[in-house]
Image (spheres, rainbow, N blue to C red):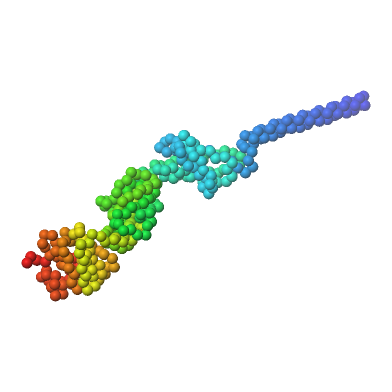
Amino acid sequence: MKNSINKQQTCLAGRQAAYGLLVVSCMLFVVSLFGCGQMGVSETQSASQGSGTSTGNITGQVRAGGSGLSGAIVAIVGTSTTKTTNATGEYTFTDVTAGVKTLQAIKTGYVTGSVTVEVIVGQTVTPETITLTANTAANDTTAPSSPNITINGGAASTGSTSVTLEVSATDNVGVTGYYVSEETTTPVVSASSWVSVTATTEYSATISFTLSSNNGTKEVSIWFKDGADNRSARVSASIRLAQVFTNIISIDAGDDHTIVLKNDGTVWAWGSNSQGQLGDGTTLDRSTPVQVSTITNVTAISAGLADSIALKNLGTVWAWGNNKNGQLGDGTTTDRYTPVQVPTF
């Protein structure tokens, strides 16, 4: 009897061991099965995200005024890579090296915008929308840039006071006017000599200009402005005026100065001017002819040692220069730098 019980216990233990091995085997099979499933999902995800080992993709949108902005240039700062937005303002970069990137959106007439995004290996990231604001006169604080001027194509000299200027400038909203002068003082925006032009971001033109009549080196300056009245820096160009005298009907010389009369009734002078004998309003010596100020319709001239005299077509007499001994006939002994009329005889 005892032997029979022992045999039954031994058999039961064997069966339990067999059952245990079966359960363990089943568990290993299940784990193996689900493990393979996970590996299959992981491989599928990796394939859908791209095959690059160190790059990712960026896709985003540029907007303005509540809608997508087409034709904007989007650049990855620090690289030469750019994209142009489509009709709905969208853009896409592929195979971008992983890391933090700054994107910058630019379009003429708009304030430049930017956004920062982190590119993740094997993924496509979507940064915040870049919203651009129209760059109108209300918020424009940038003056026209790259102003330029040349005279007669860069010629060194000219024999005529009539010259041609080639001028240009750029502005992010639009150049709206220019100011040309032989003066170097910056003009106020309300000055009447500003010339208005149709607003354009890249302005260039060929214009005519008349130089002051006195021979010598002429410096011509130009300024540009935009719709917000921002003015550019002054730029200038120089040319030497060397007019050839023609149509001279009379000439005379003093001690150290010469005067001539042209057939148009104007008087010109050069040489010593220490006492105003050239009549140009200064006491500066002149090595080239200058026009005698404030006098026209002259029919005859004469030069003294340091004074000059002219007869006008109506019979009046005018004089200028040295007056130490009253030789100008104006009732004083004051030197005159421009012509004064000799009182009626």
Image x and y of residue 147, in percent: 38, 53
Q: Is residue 247 above or below residue 306?
A: above
The reply, left or right, for residue 327 in relation to residue 167 is left
Q: Quadrant of the C terminus?
A: bottom left
Front-most of residues 13 and 249: 249
Q: Which quadrant would residue 181 be assigned to in this image?
A: bottom left
Q: Is residue 92 above or below residue 280?
A: above
The reply, left or right, for residue 167 in relation to residue 42 is left
Image x and y of residue 43, in percent: 67, 35
Image x and y of residue 157, in percent: 35, 59
Q: How many marks?
A: 0
Image x and y of residue 254, in percent: 21, 72
Q: Is residue 50 above or below residue 218?
A: above
Q: Which quadrant would residue 51 be assigned to in this image?
A: top right
Q: Residue at x 60, y 42 (%)?
A: 55
The reply, left or right, for residue 259 in relation to residue 104 is left
